[in-house]
Amino acid sequence: MKEAQDRDLSLNALINAILLRYVTYYKTIERNGKVVVSRKSFQFILNNLDESLLLDSLKKNEFNLSNFISLSKGQIEFENFVNYALEGVGVTGGIIRDFDIYKDKQGYTNILLIHGYDIKWSKIIGNTITDLIKEIFHYNSQCTFYSSSLIIRIFEKSI
Amino acid sequence: MVTQFNSTGPENSGPLGQSRSARRKTMITLSLETDILEELKTDALKERTSLSTLVTATLSKHVLLNRFAKDVDGIFITNNTFKAIVDDIEENSLEDDFTRNALDFIPTIFYSKNIPFTLQNLIKYALSSAAIDGGIYNHFHHYVDEAGLVNLVMRHNFGLKWSRILGNGHVKLIENMLNLKSTLTALPSSVVIKVNTNSANKIQAHSES
């Protein structure tokens, strides 16, 4: 009740939001087993861990394709991918803080991902997500990395 | 879709104030999005539980862990990724990081919830609940052995290196928070920490002399 008041939401809206996060993300990671790592510890891990090892593990585990297929009930659509990878694993799982999707002047879809770590993390999540987009939708894309954000430009106008 | 649920009582009756079974329950009526409700019904059926139990468990987990993880900017990683991290990073560095976090995180929760620093409370609020929810081990139990030592047993799937890190971190936490001496036995899938509850006075007497 207090949280709903603090967030200026009705209790009903808050509970719907919590249950939505459960069905789109938490239940999957609960099933696979999870560890919650604090922000400081994760930055320590990033500083000390081999980049390719983390990239491989993220692709295989966090962004697991069969989880995506299961959650989207076999409907391999870009919107479902956004719900799964960006809203669920990304924002709810803490991998990113926020994201935005927009079309540029050439009509290509751009995904802006914002996170709280460093450029190494920008590269890891950027490469993970572009690989997934290529694998699932066969779209080519290009990343631009910044210190706490990145932009993925997808060379496809039909999205 | 309007649905009625038994939910946990007001927050100030406390997720930390009472055991899960003793907590007061309140009947509430919710209007849930149809897609969410259908998904929850399917999950409840799969888990052989009622819809009400599943919703209550999900809301409890939100209050006890997920909301807190979000507040502190925590990140959820799978067990497989965590195992890869433990295997790859040098042990002393990882142990330093774990211990530094434990020595900050757990006393902070105790101070913020006004929980007295006792071994019983450490077991109740940290070792048998928050640590399991946080995933650093998946099973915990404790008992008093023949020598009168309190044995804390933590089981996990992350290997011997993690047992040593977990054990050494907790030995330091127990000494720092409770002024109690403990020893550990590390095994590949568990760690046992033996706490000497009579050691507080000795430590104090030693430091005074």
Image (cartoon, coloured by chain):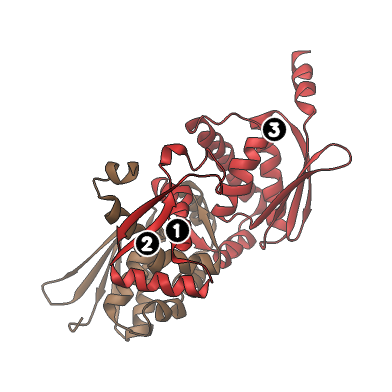
| Location of residue B62 in the rendering, given as x and y in whole percent from the top left corner | 43, 53
Q: Which residue is mark 3?
A: B175
Looking at the colours in the rendered structure, which chain would you say is drawn in brown?
A
| Quadrant of res B58 | bottom left
Q: Which circle marks residue A19 in the picture?
A: 2
Label 2, secondary structure: give it: helix
Badge 2: how crowded within 10 Å, few (<14), some, or many (20+)? many
Q: Is residue B118 visible?
A: yes
Badge 3: how crowded within 10 Å, few (<14), some, or many (20+)? some
Q: Going 37% across and 66% down the picture, which residue do you hit?
A: A88
The Cα atoms of the two marked residues, 1 and 3, are separated by: 35 Å
Label 1, secondary structure: give it: helix
Badge 1: how crowded within 10 Å, few (<14), some, or many (20+)? many
Mark 1 or 3: in front is: 1
Quadrant where the C terminus of chain A sits is bottom left
Q: Which amino acid type corresponds to the residue marked 3 in the rendered image? A: Glu
Mark 2 or 3: in front is: 2
